[in-house]
Amino acid sequence: MAMNTSIDNKKKEEEELRKRNEELERELKKSQEREEQMKVELRNTWQRLQLAEEAEERLCSQLGELEAEAVDQARDYHARIISLMSQLSQANKLLGLSGDHTITL
């Protein structure tokens, strides 16, 4: 009878080990699936980051072009103001010769 108990205990131990092994295999499979899912998410995030960086570079380039254009326009505007002030000064001088009618801004 002690032999049967020993055999029964070994069978129980084997069954418990088999169940535990199956459980560990399921957990490992789930862990591997989660790891693969995280890899996919990481790749997607990396791609979005690259797109964002490329968009940032394009925007910076466009901003630089706009700034250069704004400086050119400001210079043109300033030159136009100087020209108009010169014309106004000449008009005032001509009016001064013919009377006391000065034009002011």
Image (cartoon, rainbow, N blue to C red):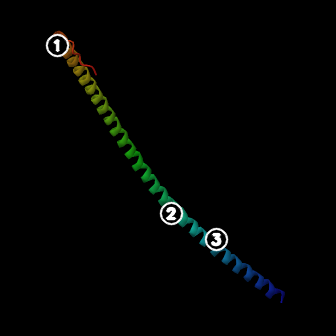
- Locate residue 49, reporting x and y percent: 44, 50
- Is residue 47 found left or right of 68 in the rendered image? right
Is residue 37 placed above or below 80 in the rendered structure? below
Is residue 35 placed above or below 84 in the rendered structure? below
Q: Nearer the viewer, residue 75 or 48?
A: 75
Q: Residue at x 29, y 33 (%)?
A: 69
How many C-alpha atoms fall within 10 Å of the one at disc 3: few (<14), some, or many (≥20)?
few
Q: Which mark is residue 94?
A: 1
Cα distance between the residues tagged 2 and 1: 84 Å
Q: Nearer the viewer, residue 53 or 85?
A: 85
Of labels 1 and 3, the one closer to you? 1
> At numbered mark 3, what does the secondary structure look like: helix, strand or loop?
helix
Q: Which mark is residue 24?
A: 3
In the picture, the quarter occupied by the C terminus is: top left
- Locate residue 7, reporting x and y percent: 76, 84
Q: Quadrant of residue 58?
A: top left
Amino acid bearing label 2: Gln
Amino acid bearing label 3: Leu
Q: Which mark is residue 37?
A: 2
**Labels 2 and 1: the sequence-earlier one:** 2
Q: Quadrant of residue 6?
A: bottom right
Q: Residue at x 48, y 59 (%)?
A: 41
**Mark 2–mark 1 contact, CB under 8 Å?**
no
- Is residue 94 found left or right of 61 in the rendered image? left
Of labels 2 and 1, the one closer to you? 1
> At numbered mark 1, what does the secondary structure look like: helix, strand or loop?
helix
